[in-house]
Image (spheres, rainbow, N blue to C red):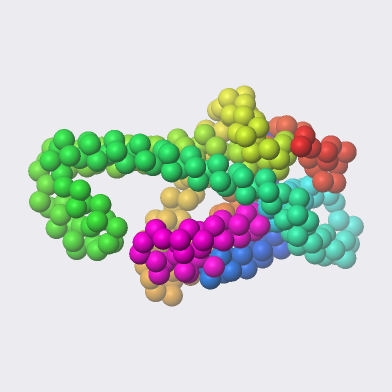
């Protein structure tokens, strides 16, 4: 698959198989309900860790099933339908792949998410120390973090207004470093998920496969990631414009389709380049 056609092919596949988005809508609603106890806790006590563990297991189950649905959807990309009955049957078959995906990939995805969380915690810890030292050296109070977490726009503006030009520049540089680190981290694990579903169920081997694929396809990876990130930024900008009124439903719906499009694009490109794991093809066996 040529890089120039990956985005249009992924869009076409998404448009023709919208049935695959249904588990996403239902899954998000269920996960929001499960995550609710975390919002009411103000301390890192035993109840918080239990709730967090339950949420991770539920997210793992959802990703296992939904990604398997997407994987099956991608296997239909070259199929030509003679009549509508065959098409409807395949759309129903997409949903039937959810629970087999949970049983097959649950442990692998749970380990994958655990690795992801571990990397985020380690990177966040050292990044937090670096940013705080940078702000302290510039004479900026750590009160800034409390104000930002409060999301009080008036208070944030007042605090920024008290900063000198050099302090404001340091603050801007700090946010730039933070954004760059987030960008580079997610770019570096762009192919982590596809590697688990197409190459190996071992998440540690999948990390290796992720980096191997990344370096072999470095320029296409940059183009794909930047393009998908730009779409995400556009939707975020649209959210700001629409505000919290009835129009906020538009970017909310767009974000769901963006998530589906993101996964389909990444999975489709990975499958085509590695020539593995098409459910309807001859290379269904994976390295386990």
Of residues 207 and 164, which is closer to you in this image? 207
Identity of the residue drawn at 16% across and 35% down: 137
Q: Where does the magenta region start and end?
A: 34-63
Which quadrant of the structure image shows residue 134?
top left
Q: Is residue 91 visible?
A: no
Q: Which residue, as the protein is rendered here, is positioned at the far front?
A: 46
Magenta-drawn stretch, dominant element (helix, strand or loop): helix
Identity of the residue drawn at 49% across and 49% down: 231
Split into 4 quadrants, where in the image is the C terminus?
A: top right
Which quadrant of the structure image shows residue 248?
bottom left
Marker count (numbered): 0
Identity of the residue drawn at 14% across and 58% down: 158
Of residues 23 and 89, which is closer to you in this image? 23
Is 44 placed left or right of 158 in the picture? Answer: right
Residue 59 shown in magenta: yes
Which quadrant of the structure image shows residue 133?
top left
Q: Is residue 36 visible?
A: yes
Is 221 placed left or right of 81 in the picture? Answer: left
Split into 4 quadrants, where in the image is the N terminus?
A: top right
Is 161 placed left or right of 36 in the picture? Answer: left
- Can you give x and y, in whole percent of width and height, for residue 75 in the image? 79, 47
Q: Which residue, as the protein is rendered here, is positioned at the far bottom?
A: 246
Residue 38 shown in magenta: yes
Q: Which residue, as the protein is rendered here, is positioned at the far top?
A: 216
- Can you give x and y, in whole percent of width and height, for residue 240 in the image? 36, 61
- Can you give x and y, in whole percent of width and height, for residue 40 in the image? 40, 69
Identity of the residue drawn at 61% across and 64% down: 27
- Can you give x and y, in whole percent of width and height, for residue 227 in the image? 51, 42
């Amino acid at each position: 698959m040529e890089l120039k056609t990956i985005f249009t092919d992924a869009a076409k596949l998404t448009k023709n198989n919208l049935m695959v988005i249904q588990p996403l809508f239902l899954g998000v609603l269920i996960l929001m309900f499960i995550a609710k106890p975390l919002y009411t806790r103000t301390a890192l006590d035993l109840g918080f860790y239990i709730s967090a563990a339950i949420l991770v297991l539920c997210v793992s189950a959802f990703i296992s099933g939904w990604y398997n649905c997407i994987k099956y959807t991608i296997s239909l990309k070259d199929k030509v339908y003679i009549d509508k009955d065959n098409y409807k049957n395949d759309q129903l078959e997409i949903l039937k792949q959810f629970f087999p995906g949970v049983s097959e990939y649950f442990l692998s995805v749970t380990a994958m998410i655990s690795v992801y969380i571990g990397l985020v915690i380690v990177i966040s810890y050292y990044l937090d120390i670096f940013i705080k030292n940078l702000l302290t050296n510039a004479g900026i109070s750590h009160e800034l973090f409390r104000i930002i977490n409060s999301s009080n726009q008036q208070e944030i503006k007042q605090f920024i207004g008290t900063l000198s030009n050099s302090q404001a520049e340091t603050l801007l540089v700090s946010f730039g470093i933070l954004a760059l680190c987030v960008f580079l981290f997610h770019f570096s694990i762009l192919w982590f998920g596809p590697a688990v579903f197409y190459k190996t169920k071992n998440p540690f081997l999948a990390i290796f496969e992720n980096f191997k694929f990344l370096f072999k396809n470095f320029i296409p990876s940059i183009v794909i990631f930047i393009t998908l990130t730009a779409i995400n930024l556009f939707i975020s900008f649209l959210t700001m414009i629409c505000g919290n009124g009835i129009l906020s439903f538009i970017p909310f719906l767009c974000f769901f389709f963006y998530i589906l499009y993101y996964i389909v694009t990444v999975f489709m490109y990975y499958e085509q380049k590695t020539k593995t794991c098409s459910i309807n093809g001859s290379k269904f066996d994976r390295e386990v």
